[in-house]
Structure formats: structure tokens, C-alpha cells
Image: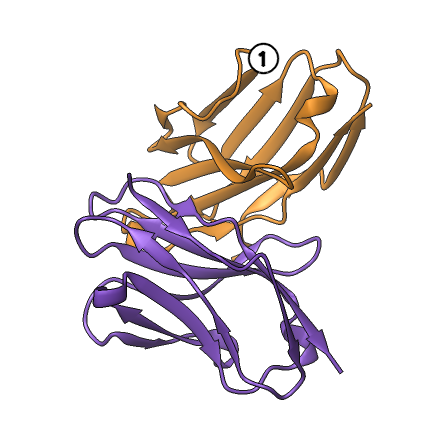
Chain colours: A orange, B purple
Amino acid sequence: DAGVIQSPRHEVTEMGQEVTLRCKPISGHNSLFWYRQTMMRGLELLIYFNNNVPIDDSGMPEDRFSAKMPNASFSTLKIQPSEPRDSAVYFCASSSSDRRDGYTFGSGTRLTVV
Amino acid sequence: AQSVTQPDIHITVSEGASLELRCNYSYGATPYLFWYVQSPGQGLQLLLKYFSGDTLVQGIKGFEAEFKRSQSSFNLRKPSVHWSDAAEYFCAFMNTGFQKLVFGTGTRLLVSP
């Protein structure tokens, strides 16, 4: 398996633009998680899905952030409009139904909003 | 509140020396505990995990961790550190309801020659 695949690896955008981050989880995993990593706040869970359904989005910082999982093999995290304070590394992770196996993380998307 | 704490932000160890990274948790029952490693520019990789049984667990890359209920700790150890171990290490906690994984703030390991 190729692991969790995220795209793009790097994104530089101007303030006010829409940004879409993409994630392909491991085949057979039924849970998907979006995390944000910054120096100031560390790793924050933004939202997670079970069987394509959003379960907990309490970590989504503002209405500017939205996430979808239209099918078991694809998820997006969208920021509209983007702001400089959204600059961070965004990680996607997936897990099987037995969460005790831990999560498998993608390589992340480094977002810079100028 | 359910949480995990890593008291050391940075640790420097000489190559070949032993390593211990500290992790403490706050939870009323025995949680599920994990250690992850993040190399620069990379995602997080699972080193090892504990949820029951033998309190000393072995992981990848020669790492081990010991669960101590009396101290609410799950410290990560390695007997001899290699330069390639320089990275950030995260302890993580999951409650027995199998909900979300909550990460500590991380410990950055520097390895000196």
C-alpha cells in the first residue's frame, strides 16, 4: 500500500484565495482525520470522519474551514478565504476500525498564506 | 481532563548514549498510549503502542517504552542513540472509548557527535 497520500506537498497562496487540500486514505481504513501542526499550538485535530460521515468537527477553527469525504478513498479540506494565520502543516491520517492500531499519517501539506 | 504531557521540549544526547523521553498522562482508567516520531519535513510514524498486558513494549528502530500506572507515565527509551534518531517525538493518548488520538506537545531530540 502506498500509505496515506496528500496533495499538494506545498502550497503558497495569497490571502483571500481559496485553498483545497486533498487526502487519499489507506484502502480499507474507515476513519480519516485532519490535523493542523503549528509551532505555537502543536498538533490539533480539526475534524474526523467514520465511514465517510463527519463525527467531530469541534476542532475546525472557523467557518472558513470545511471538510468533505465524498467516498471512502478521498477527502478534502478547504479554506475559503485563506488568511496568513492559516499557514501551517496540515496532516491527514487514517485508521482501521480498530483504533488501537494507531493512525497512519500522510506526509502533510505545508500551506503558506502570504 | 484527559491529557498527555511531555515535560521536555528539547533534549540533547550524545551519539551512543542512552535516551529516555518522558510522557505523563491524566486519565481515570488505563488509556491507550502511543509514541510517534516525526523526522523533519515528514509525517508521523508510529514507534510503539500500549493498551494492555506486558507493561514493557518493544517498538521499531530499537525503541521501547514502559507503562507505569503508579506514576501515570509511559516513557520512551533507547539504549544507544544514533544520529539518525534526531527528530521530534510525540506521545499520544486515546481513551478506552476509542475516540480521537490526542497528542502531547512533543520533544525535540538532538544528537551530538
- Residue B37 lies, with reference to residue A110, above or below; the image says below
- Residue B101 lies, with reference to residue B22, above or below; the image says above
State which quarter of the image contains the C terminus of chain B. bottom right
Whether residue A82 is visible: yes
The amino acid beneath tag 1 is Arg
* In this rendering, position of residue A34 left or right of residue B95: right
Residue B46 or residue B85, whichever sits in front: B85
How crowded is the residue under tag 1: few (<14 C-alpha within 10 Å), some, or many (20+)?
A: few
Q: Quadrant of residue B71?
A: bottom left
State which quarter of the image contains the N terminus of chain B. top left
How many numbered markers are drawn?
Answer: 1
- Residue A38 lies, with reference to residue A55, above or below; the image says below
Please give the name of the residue rendered at 53% of the width and 11% of the height, measured from the top-left corner. A63
Whether residue A101 is visible: no
Q: Residue B88: x percent and y percent?
A: 60, 60
Residue B56 or residue B43, whichever sits in front: B56
Q: Which residue is mark 1?
A: A64
Please give the name of the residue rendered at 58% of the width and 56% of the height, measured from the top-left corner. B9
Q: Quadrant of residue A109?
A: top right
Q: Residue B5: x percent and y percent?
A: 42, 52
Q: Residue A102: x percent and y percent?
A: 38, 55
**Circle 1 sits in a helix, a strand or a loop, which is it?**
loop
* In this rendering, position of residue B45 left or right of residue A112: left
Q: Quadrant of residue A19?
A: top right
Q: Residue A35: x percent and y percent?
A: 52, 37
Residue B79 or residue A100, whichever sits in front: B79
Please give the name of the residue rendered at 37% of the width and 45% of the height, measured from the top-left corner. B101
Badge 1 sits on which subunit?
A: A
- Residue A41 lies, with reference to residue B35, above or below; the image says above
* In this rendering, position of residue A112 left or right of residue B12: right
